[in-house]
Image: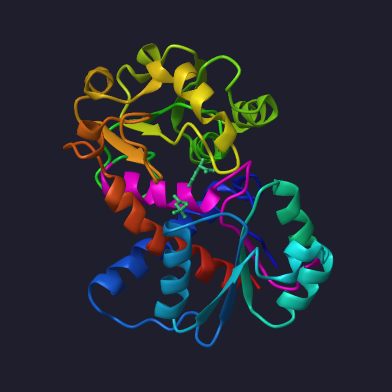
Amino acid sequence: MKHFLTLRDYQQADIIEIIKLAIAIKKDYKENKERNDMHKKILGMIFEKNSTRTRVSFEAGIYQLGGNGIFLSGKEIQLSRGESIADTARVISSMVDMIMIRTFEHERLEEFAKFSHVPVINGLSDLYHPVQVIADYLTMIENGIFVKGSFDAAYKQDPRVVYVGDGNNMTHSWLLLAAIMGFEINVACPRGYMPKQEILEYAQKISTKDIRIYEDPNEAIRGCNVVVTDTWVSMGQEEQKEEKKKIFKDYCIDCAKMELADKEAIFLHCLPAYRGQEVSEEVLEGRQSRVFQEAENRLHAQKGIMVWLNKQS
Ligand code: CP
Ligand code: NVA
Protein backbone atom coordinates (compact mmCIF):
# COMPACT_ATOMS: atom_id res chain seq x y z
CA MET A 1 0.00 0.00 0.00
CA LYS A 2 1.32 3.41 -0.98
CA HIS A 3 0.58 6.81 0.58
CA PHE A 4 0.95 10.24 -1.08
CA LEU A 5 2.50 12.34 1.69
CA THR A 6 5.53 13.83 -0.06
CA LEU A 7 7.16 13.55 -3.48
CA ARG A 8 10.24 12.22 -1.67
CA ASP A 9 8.56 8.80 -1.82
CA TYR A 10 8.06 9.05 -5.60
CA GLN A 11 10.14 8.30 -8.70
CA GLN A 12 9.97 10.08 -12.05
CA ALA A 13 8.18 7.05 -13.58
CA ASP A 14 5.44 7.21 -10.90
CA ILE A 15 4.79 10.90 -11.55
CA ILE A 16 4.67 10.31 -15.30
CA GLU A 17 2.10 7.54 -14.76
CA ILE A 18 -0.01 9.82 -12.55
CA ILE A 19 0.17 12.67 -15.07
CA LYS A 20 -0.74 10.37 -17.95
CA LEU A 21 -3.75 9.15 -15.96
CA ALA A 22 -4.72 12.75 -15.22
CA ILE A 23 -4.47 13.68 -18.91
CA ALA A 24 -6.68 10.72 -19.93
CA ILE A 25 -9.17 11.41 -17.13
CA LYS A 26 -9.36 15.10 -18.05
CA LYS A 27 -9.98 14.23 -21.71
CA ASP A 28 -12.84 11.89 -20.76
CA TYR A 29 -14.30 14.53 -18.44
CA LYS A 30 -14.23 17.15 -21.20
CA GLU A 31 -15.91 14.69 -23.58
CA ASN A 32 -18.58 13.85 -20.97
CA LYS A 33 -17.41 10.23 -20.82
CA GLU A 34 -18.31 8.62 -17.53
CA ARG A 35 -15.55 6.89 -15.55
CA ASN A 36 -15.93 4.44 -12.71
CA ASP A 37 -12.33 3.94 -11.63
CA MET A 38 -13.33 4.54 -7.98
CA HIS A 39 -16.69 2.76 -8.11
CA LYS A 40 -18.26 2.74 -4.61
CA LYS A 41 -14.96 3.88 -3.05
CA ILE A 42 -15.24 6.28 -0.13
CA LEU A 43 -12.74 9.10 0.39
CA GLY A 44 -12.55 10.54 3.93
CA MET A 45 -11.35 14.16 3.88
CA ILE A 46 -10.04 15.67 7.13
CA PHE A 47 -9.47 19.43 7.06
CA GLU A 48 -7.67 21.03 9.99
CA LYS A 49 -7.15 24.19 7.87
CA ASN A 50 -9.41 26.11 5.47
CA SER A 51 -9.72 25.18 1.81
CA THR A 52 -11.61 26.00 -1.36
CA ARG A 53 -9.77 24.21 -4.19
CA THR A 54 -8.61 21.13 -2.31
CA ARG A 55 -11.98 20.41 -0.81
CA VAL A 56 -14.02 20.95 -3.96
CA SER A 57 -11.59 19.14 -6.26
CA PHE A 58 -11.31 16.05 -4.05
CA GLU A 59 -15.03 15.89 -3.31
CA ALA A 60 -16.11 16.47 -6.92
CA GLY A 61 -13.27 14.23 -8.14
CA ILE A 62 -14.16 11.13 -6.14
CA TYR A 63 -17.84 11.54 -7.06
CA GLN A 64 -17.04 11.90 -10.77
CA LEU A 65 -15.05 8.64 -10.57
CA GLY A 66 -18.02 6.71 -9.18
CA GLY A 67 -17.24 7.05 -5.47
CA ASN A 68 -18.19 9.36 -2.63
CA GLY A 69 -16.43 11.78 -0.28
CA ILE A 70 -17.00 12.47 3.42
CA PHE A 71 -15.93 15.93 4.58
CA LEU A 72 -14.61 15.92 8.14
CA SER A 73 -13.84 19.28 9.69
CA GLY A 74 -10.93 18.96 12.09
CA LYS A 75 -12.90 21.12 14.54
CA GLU A 76 -15.92 18.81 14.53
CA ILE A 77 -14.34 15.40 14.92
CA GLN A 78 -13.04 14.02 18.22
CA LEU A 79 -9.45 14.74 17.15
CA SER A 80 -9.96 18.33 18.29
CA ARG A 81 -11.07 17.08 21.73
CA GLY A 82 -7.88 15.11 22.19
CA GLU A 83 -8.56 11.73 20.57
CA SER A 84 -5.19 10.50 19.37
CA ILE A 85 -4.14 10.46 15.74
CA ALA A 86 -3.41 6.75 16.03
CA ASP A 87 -6.94 5.95 17.21
CA THR A 88 -8.54 8.30 14.68
CA ALA A 89 -6.54 6.73 11.85
CA ARG A 90 -7.46 3.17 12.83
CA VAL A 91 -11.15 4.00 13.15
CA ILE A 92 -11.61 6.08 10.00
CA SER A 93 -9.48 3.78 7.86
CA SER A 94 -11.58 0.80 8.90
CA MET A 95 -14.59 2.47 7.28
CA VAL A 96 -13.33 4.23 4.13
CA ASP A 97 -11.07 3.33 1.20
CA MET A 98 -8.79 6.37 1.07
CA ILE A 99 -8.12 9.39 3.30
CA MET A 100 -7.02 12.93 2.48
CA ILE A 101 -5.74 15.15 5.27
CA ARG A 102 -4.91 18.86 5.41
CA THR A 103 -3.09 19.66 8.58
CA PHE A 104 -0.33 21.63 10.33
CA GLU A 105 2.78 19.65 11.32
CA HIS A 106 3.79 17.12 8.68
CA GLU A 107 4.46 14.61 11.48
CA ARG A 108 0.69 14.44 12.09
CA LEU A 109 0.26 13.06 8.59
CA GLU A 110 3.10 10.58 9.03
CA GLU A 111 1.60 9.39 12.31
CA PHE A 112 -1.82 9.04 10.69
CA ALA A 113 -0.40 7.10 7.75
CA LYS A 114 1.48 4.78 10.11
CA PHE A 115 -1.80 3.63 11.66
CA SER A 116 -4.03 3.81 8.58
CA HIS A 117 -5.18 0.65 6.79
CA VAL A 118 -5.82 2.64 3.59
CA PRO A 119 -3.81 5.10 1.46
CA VAL A 120 -3.39 8.59 2.94
CA ILE A 121 -3.02 11.69 0.75
CA ASN A 122 -1.42 14.93 1.92
CA GLY A 123 -3.86 17.74 1.08
CA LEU A 124 -1.28 20.26 2.45
CA SER A 125 0.90 20.27 5.52
CA ASP A 126 3.21 22.97 6.87
CA LEU A 127 6.04 21.24 5.00
CA TYR A 128 4.63 20.13 1.64
CA HIS A 129 1.76 20.54 -0.83
CA PRO A 130 2.41 17.62 -3.21
CA VAL A 131 -1.04 17.36 -4.83
CA GLN A 132 -0.75 21.01 -5.88
CA VAL A 133 2.52 20.55 -7.77
CA ILE A 134 1.13 17.56 -9.68
CA ALA A 135 -1.56 19.94 -10.97
CA ASP A 136 1.14 22.54 -11.63
CA TYR A 137 3.21 20.06 -13.64
CA LEU A 138 0.13 19.08 -15.64
CA THR A 139 -0.39 22.79 -16.38
CA MET A 140 3.23 23.13 -17.50
CA ILE A 141 2.82 20.18 -19.87
CA GLU A 142 -0.40 21.56 -21.31
CA ASN A 143 1.51 24.76 -22.03
CA GLY A 144 4.29 22.89 -23.86
CA ILE A 145 6.77 23.17 -20.98
CA PHE A 146 8.11 19.76 -19.98
CA VAL A 147 11.19 17.63 -19.72
CA LYS A 148 12.58 16.14 -22.91
CA GLY A 149 11.55 12.52 -23.45
CA SER A 150 8.91 12.44 -20.71
CA PHE A 151 5.88 12.94 -22.91
CA ASP A 152 4.88 12.33 -26.51
CA ALA A 153 4.38 15.96 -27.36
CA ALA A 154 6.21 18.78 -29.12
CA TYR A 155 9.27 19.59 -27.03
CA LYS A 156 10.43 23.22 -26.97
CA GLN A 157 13.38 23.60 -24.63
CA ASP A 158 14.81 22.55 -21.25
CA PRO A 159 12.49 24.36 -18.85
CA ARG A 160 13.68 26.61 -16.08
CA VAL A 161 11.23 27.43 -13.31
CA VAL A 162 11.62 30.27 -10.82
CA TYR A 163 9.86 30.38 -7.46
CA VAL A 164 9.83 33.82 -5.84
CA GLY A 165 8.61 34.53 -2.31
CA ASP A 166 8.33 32.72 0.98
CA GLY A 167 10.30 29.49 1.37
CA ASN A 168 7.27 27.42 2.36
CA ASN A 169 5.38 24.17 1.69
CA MET A 170 4.96 25.13 -1.99
CA THR A 171 8.67 25.88 -2.39
CA HIS A 172 9.56 22.52 -0.86
CA SER A 173 7.21 20.65 -3.18
CA TRP A 174 8.48 22.58 -6.23
CA LEU A 175 12.08 21.75 -5.29
CA LEU A 176 11.22 18.05 -5.12
CA LEU A 177 9.21 18.15 -8.35
CA ALA A 178 12.11 19.82 -10.17
CA ALA A 179 14.63 17.35 -8.78
CA ILE A 180 12.55 14.27 -9.65
CA MET A 181 11.36 15.40 -13.07
CA GLY A 182 14.74 16.86 -13.97
CA PHE A 183 14.21 20.54 -14.66
CA GLU A 184 16.15 23.58 -13.47
CA ILE A 185 14.70 25.68 -10.69
CA ASN A 186 15.74 29.01 -9.21
CA VAL A 187 14.37 30.00 -5.83
CA ALA A 188 14.43 33.61 -4.60
CA CYS A 189 13.52 34.36 -0.99
CA PRO A 190 14.48 37.05 1.52
CA ARG A 191 17.19 36.09 3.98
CA GLY A 192 15.60 34.24 6.89
CA TYR A 193 12.72 32.96 4.73
CA MET A 194 14.60 30.42 2.65
CA PRO A 195 13.32 26.86 2.17
CA LYS A 196 14.45 24.32 4.72
CA GLN A 197 18.12 23.53 4.21
CA GLU A 198 17.64 19.78 4.56
CA ILE A 199 14.99 19.69 1.81
CA LEU A 200 17.06 21.94 -0.44
CA GLU A 201 20.14 19.77 -0.02
CA TYR A 202 18.12 16.59 -0.63
CA ALA A 203 16.69 18.07 -3.85
CA GLN A 204 20.15 19.20 -4.98
CA LYS A 205 21.57 15.77 -4.23
CA ILE A 206 19.04 13.83 -6.32
CA SER A 207 18.65 16.35 -9.17
CA THR A 208 20.47 16.08 -12.46
CA LYS A 209 19.76 19.77 -13.13
CA ASP A 210 20.77 23.00 -11.39
CA ILE A 211 18.90 24.19 -8.32
CA ARG A 212 19.97 27.74 -7.45
CA ILE A 213 19.10 29.93 -4.49
CA TYR A 214 18.95 33.74 -4.72
CA GLU A 215 18.05 36.67 -2.53
CA ASP A 216 17.59 38.96 -5.54
CA PRO A 217 14.31 38.06 -7.30
CA ASN A 218 15.26 39.95 -10.49
CA GLU A 219 18.42 37.94 -10.95
CA ALA A 220 16.52 34.71 -10.32
CA ILE A 221 13.71 35.42 -12.82
CA ARG A 222 15.92 36.29 -15.80
CA GLY A 223 15.14 34.02 -18.78
CA CYS A 224 12.88 31.60 -16.88
CA ASN A 225 9.99 29.79 -18.58
CA VAL A 226 7.70 29.44 -15.58
CA VAL A 227 7.33 32.08 -12.87
CA VAL A 228 5.77 30.84 -9.63
CA THR A 229 4.83 32.53 -6.40
CA ASP A 230 2.62 31.91 -3.38
CA THR A 231 1.18 33.86 -0.50
CA TRP A 232 3.72 35.44 1.84
CA VAL A 233 1.57 34.42 4.82
CA SER A 234 0.70 30.75 4.93
CA MET A 235 -2.15 29.37 7.01
CA GLY A 236 -1.12 29.38 10.64
CA GLN A 237 1.24 32.39 10.25
CA GLU A 238 -1.42 35.11 10.36
CA GLU A 239 0.29 37.00 13.20
CA GLN A 240 3.36 37.56 10.95
CA LYS A 241 1.31 39.33 8.25
CA GLU A 242 2.34 42.95 8.81
CA GLU A 243 6.01 42.16 9.39
CA LYS A 244 6.16 39.94 6.28
CA LYS A 245 4.50 42.58 4.08
CA LYS A 246 7.49 44.84 4.80
CA ILE A 247 10.16 42.16 4.40
CA PHE A 248 8.74 40.81 1.13
CA LYS A 249 7.86 44.12 -0.58
CA ASP A 250 10.49 43.66 -3.34
CA TYR A 251 9.29 40.15 -4.10
CA CYS A 252 5.95 41.07 -5.71
CA ILE A 253 5.62 39.56 -9.20
CA ASP A 254 4.60 42.59 -11.24
CA CYS A 255 4.87 43.37 -14.95
CA ALA A 256 8.46 44.64 -14.57
CA LYS A 257 9.49 41.29 -13.10
CA MET A 258 7.63 39.30 -15.76
CA GLU A 259 9.52 41.32 -18.40
CA LEU A 260 12.75 39.73 -17.13
CA ALA A 261 11.46 36.19 -17.75
CA ASP A 262 11.30 34.48 -21.13
CA LYS A 263 8.78 36.38 -23.25
CA GLU A 264 6.65 33.21 -23.56
CA ALA A 265 6.90 32.49 -19.81
CA ILE A 266 3.79 31.45 -17.95
CA PHE A 267 2.81 32.57 -14.46
CA LEU A 268 1.56 30.09 -11.86
CA HIS A 269 0.16 30.55 -8.34
CA CYS A 270 -1.56 27.83 -6.32
CA LEU A 271 -4.12 30.39 -5.06
CA PRO A 272 -5.62 31.95 -3.02
CA ALA A 273 -3.75 35.05 -4.26
CA TYR A 274 -3.35 38.37 -2.50
CA ARG A 275 -3.31 40.99 -5.24
CA GLY A 276 -0.84 43.80 -4.61
CA GLN A 277 1.24 41.61 -2.30
CA GLU A 278 2.95 38.57 -3.87
CA VAL A 279 1.48 39.32 -7.32
CA SER A 280 0.08 42.38 -9.06
CA GLU A 281 -3.45 42.47 -10.42
CA GLU A 282 -2.01 42.95 -13.96
CA VAL A 283 0.10 39.79 -13.81
CA LEU A 284 -2.58 37.65 -12.19
CA GLU A 285 -5.12 38.68 -14.82
CA GLY A 286 -2.59 39.09 -17.63
CA ARG A 287 -1.78 37.14 -20.82
CA GLN A 288 0.89 35.00 -19.17
CA SER A 289 -1.18 33.90 -16.19
CA ARG A 290 -2.41 30.30 -16.16
CA VAL A 291 -3.68 30.32 -12.58
CA PHE A 292 -7.26 29.32 -13.34
CA GLN A 293 -6.18 26.51 -15.67
CA GLU A 294 -3.86 25.46 -12.83
CA ALA A 295 -6.71 25.57 -10.30
CA GLU A 296 -8.98 23.51 -12.56
CA ASN A 297 -6.17 20.99 -12.99
CA ARG A 298 -6.37 20.21 -9.28
CA LEU A 299 -9.50 18.22 -10.14
CA HIS A 300 -7.88 16.18 -12.90
CA ALA A 301 -4.48 15.74 -11.21
CA GLN A 302 -6.02 14.48 -7.98
CA LYS A 303 -8.26 12.07 -9.83
CA GLY A 304 -5.02 10.74 -11.36
CA ILE A 305 -3.47 10.43 -7.88
CA MET A 306 -6.50 8.64 -6.41
CA VAL A 307 -6.76 6.19 -9.31
CA TRP A 308 -3.01 5.52 -9.19
CA LEU A 309 -3.07 4.89 -5.42
CA ASN A 310 -6.12 2.67 -5.76
CA LYS A 311 -4.26 0.56 -8.29
CA GLN A 312 -1.31 0.10 -5.90
CA SER A 313 -3.45 -1.21 -3.03
N1 CP B 1 -4.21 25.86 -3.61
C1 CP B 1 -4.95 25.33 -2.63
O1 CP B 1 -4.61 24.29 -2.03
O2 CP B 1 -6.11 26.00 -2.40
P1 CP B 1 -7.10 25.81 -1.17
O3 CP B 1 -6.40 26.26 0.06
O4 CP B 1 -8.30 26.64 -1.51
O5 CP B 1 -7.46 24.34 -1.06
N1 NVA C 1 1.50 28.22 1.38
C1 NVA C 1 0.07 28.31 1.47
C2 NVA C 1 -0.58 27.51 0.39
C3 NVA C 1 -2.09 27.61 0.35
C4 NVA C 1 -2.71 26.72 -0.66
C5 NVA C 1 -0.40 27.88 2.83
O1 NVA C 1 0.15 26.91 3.37
O2 NVA C 1 -1.29 28.51 3.39
Q: Using the image as rendered, state which of residue 273 and residue 136 is in the foreground.
A: 273
Q: Using the image as rendered, state which of residue 188 and residue 185 is in the foreground.
A: 188
Q: Is residue 111 visible?
A: yes
Relative height, residue 187 to residue 115 (above, below):
above
Residue 113, image quadrant = bottom right
Relative height, residue 296 to residue 99 (above, below):
above
What percent of the width, then of the height, locates residue 255?
Answer: 22, 23
What percent of the width, then of the height, locates residue 30?
Answer: 24, 70
Residue 172, image quadrant = top right
Indicate yes or no whether the magenta region holds residue 143.
Answer: yes
Would residue 253 be found to the left or right of residue 17 on screen?
left
Residue located at (43% from left, 58% from top): 52
Would residue 218 be found to the left or right of residue 132 on screen?
left
| Quadrant assignment for the C terminus | bottom right
Indicate yes or no whether the magenta region holds residue 6.
Answer: no
Would residue 205 be found to the left or right of residue 251 on screen?
right
Residue located at (70% from left, 46% from top): 105
What percent of the width, then of the height, locates residue 244?
Answer: 51, 24
Q: Is residue 210 visible?
A: no
Relative height, residue 73 to residue 7 (above, below):
below
Residue located at (42% from left, 65% from top): 57
In the rendered structure, which segment of residues is drawn in magenta?
115-144
| Quadrant assignment for the N terminus | bottom right
Residue located at (49% from left, 17% from top): 247
Relative height, residue 99 to residue 281 (above, below):
below
